[in-house]
Amino acid sequence: MIDIDADEAYRNRVKANYEFSTWAGHTREGTKDVRLTDVRISPEQIKGGKLEEAEELPSVRQRRERRYIYASPESGGRRRLLLTTLECNSVLDAHESLIDVVMTYMAPRLPRCETKGPELGDICFGSHGDVNLSVIFARFNILAEIKNAGTEPTSVDEFARAVDSVIYGYYRRSPG
């Protein structure tokens, strides 16, 4: 039997640990009502990566989820990155979803990306160690998670910057 109160208590502890109240619902631009739709990360937008696979997953709560696998052609397939994007219903929904994702990691707390170099999205968490082997960030209502999926550990920073730039480009082209 699932203890909903215990799950909610754990979620609240995670939110406190990540100082959720200080960034929830806020964007770097100060806008709160941005809702980008049909955001796609095409191979033409990502330099140096070859798209091996792309799939749209069944919609849950009217959210569009896409998964992509990009490979570095010169690595012989040893360097691959898995990108998952989730189009959330609002900026706050993307931030709540970010909490959902960090709750699945085994680390008690993931470092903020800007403490390791890349400033990504409105809020971003990276991996432990000298090199970011994964990042999770929210930019407006889009949640992006990038992880190593190959046999050769690879920094995701450059790829994540490109993904963030693509998402930001949708915002710059959006009406309003």
Image (cartoon, rainbow, N blue to C red):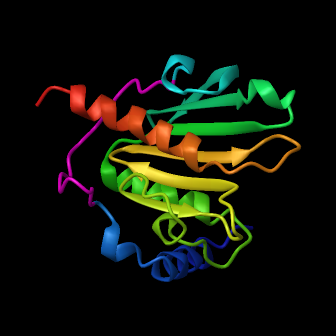
Image vertical order of residue 125 relative to residue 90, above or below: below
At 74% from the left edge and 70% from the top edge, which residue is drawn?
106
At 53% from the left edge and 82% from the top edge, which residue is drawn?
13
Q: Position of residue 38 (x, y in %)?
A: 40, 23
Where, quadrant-wise, is the C terminus in this rendering?
top left
At 57% from the left edge and 19% from the top edge, which residue is drawn?
43
Q: Position of residue 66 (x, y in %)?
A: 57, 30
Report if residue 34 lies within the magenta region.
Answer: yes
Extreme-top residue of the structure: 44
Out of 150 and 110, give the one closest to the viewer.
150
Image vertical order of residue 88 relative to residue 110, above or below: above
What secondary structure prevails in the magenta region?
A: loop
Image vertical order of residue 15 relative to residue 123, above or below: below
Extreme-front residue of the structure: 74
Extreme-left residue of the structure: 176
Out of 141 and 121, give the one closest to the viewer.
121
Q: Position of residue 79 (x, y in %)?
A: 79, 37
Q: Position of residue 162 (x, y in %)?
A: 48, 37
Out of 95 and 172, give the one closest to the viewer.
172
Q: Count all numbered tags in the image, as a single digit.
A: 0
The residue segment tinted magenta is 26-41
Report if residue 39 lies within the magenta region.
Answer: yes
Q: Is residue 145 left or right of residue 92?
A: right
Q: Is residue 11 left or right of residue 107?
A: left
Where, quadrant-wise, is the N terminus in this rendering?
bottom right
Out of 116 and 106, give the one closest to the viewer.
116
At 66% from the left edge and 73% from the top edge, which residue is drawn?
3
When asked about the image quadrant of residue 111, the answer is: bottom right
Q: Is residue 167 left or right of residue 10?
A: left
